[in-house]
Image (cartoon, grey):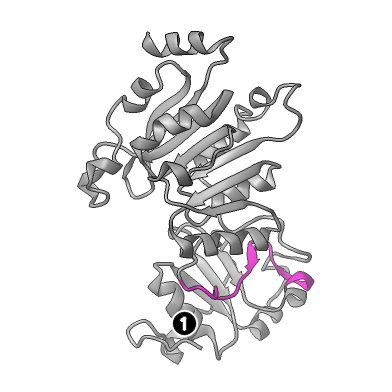
Amino acid sequence: MRSVPHNLAWTAEQRDSFKPLHYDPTLCWLDTRSADQFCQVRFERAFPWQLPLNPNCLNQLPNREQPLGLIADVQSVLIYQAWLAEKGYQLQAWLSPEQFLQLDSGQWPMVSGPQTRRLWQANPFLIEQLANALLFPQVISSDRGSARLALDLGCGGGREAVYLAKQGWQVVAVDNQAPALECAMDLARAEQVLVDFRLADLTKPCERPSETFDVIYQLRFLDRNLFDYIETQLKPGGYVLIETFAEGVQAFGSPKNRKFILQPGELAQRFAHFDIIVDKLGTLSDGRPMNAFLARKPTYKSRSEYDESKEQ
């Protein structure tokens, strides 16, 4: 077991002070009991959870702004609390398994069965476009069959790739960091989906996927040298979806390098010959500005028609 940093650990008195007096519907509960115990009775907003084998894998947890409750035995609660605190999460309540079973079910909403919702969330912009059906009927024509192929550039922990796989997509997800891909593969196994994860350096053309795709996306990742590649590897009628940091983010501390920051109108200018569907500015919960962009590659009758469109 991991040692508990002294500056993060609760005393017994502090631990006991985190026992909740009433049900808080805003909390998400991390439940460390066995799978059988969890399915027998649980909070509605409870999720089965254990410390990840890789301490850097946070992709199965919610955003740090989400307040958490914890169900864990007395012997391990400090270890869980210290780990969560070190990662920046807000643990606001704790119950031992024995205390949980003693709660009045009339005052504490409880259910049985497995949790069908997930604790983590994929990128909201990607989810929004899927919900709007922009990425479904248009990318599939009768002569393509039912397969939908997406490419995730700089996939990191793999949330979006796994999310798409759960929606029935075939996904190729690429990153140059082996530890991140290990976390992504753990998430795919936990969600029981198949994703084609690839360790590759996207700055090297020879390591880039050679397939053509219905959707290519990059989120909180920007490499302008990939724009030509994206355009080439998109099928006619396919989509490019990008959301990353916009001008003004420097005031928030990170990122500061302009290489990773979009300029106003940059994507609309670069993909001007595409059908631009979304090009908007927004902010993260911490205030950092983001540019969300979605465009569709036109369908051309000939290569010369396509080349002419780019010259306009």
Q: Residue at x 38, y 40 (%)?
A: 244
Q: Is residue 145 left or right of residue 263?
A: right
Q: Say if residue 290 shows up in the picture.
A: no
| The stretch drawn in magenta includes residue 12 | no
In this picture, is 231 found above or below 156?
above
Give, as a three-letter code, the residue at label 1.
Ser
Q: Is residue 268 above or below residue 39?
A: above
Furthest residue to the front? 206
Which residue is labeled 1 in the image?
17
Q: Label 1 crowding class (10 Å Cα cut-off): few <14, some 14-19, many 20+?
A: some
Numbered range of the magenta stretch: 38-55
Please give left or right for residue 212 compared with residue 5 in the image. Answer: right
Residue 98 located left or right of residue 61 = right
Residue 230 at x, y = what percent? 47, 32
Q: Is residue 48 magenta?
A: yes
| Residue 137 placement: quadrant | top right
Tell me how many marks there are.
1
| In front of the other: 186 or 37 | 186
Q: Is residue 64 visible?
A: yes
Where is residue 166 drawn, in percent x and y? 68, 48
**Residue 55 percent across, percent down from the top left:** 47, 73
- Choose between 16 and 145: the one closer to the eye: 145
- Vertical placement of 171 versus 35: above or below? above
Element carrying mark 1:
helix
In the picture, the quarter occupied by the C terminus is: top left
Q: Along the line of sight, which residue is nearer the eye, 249 or 13? A: 249
> Going 50% across and 57% down the picture, which residue do you hit?
157
Looking at the picture, does residue 249 appear above or below residue 281? below
Q: Residue at x 58, y 37 (%)?
A: 211
Residue at the (52%, 13%) spot, across then down: 303
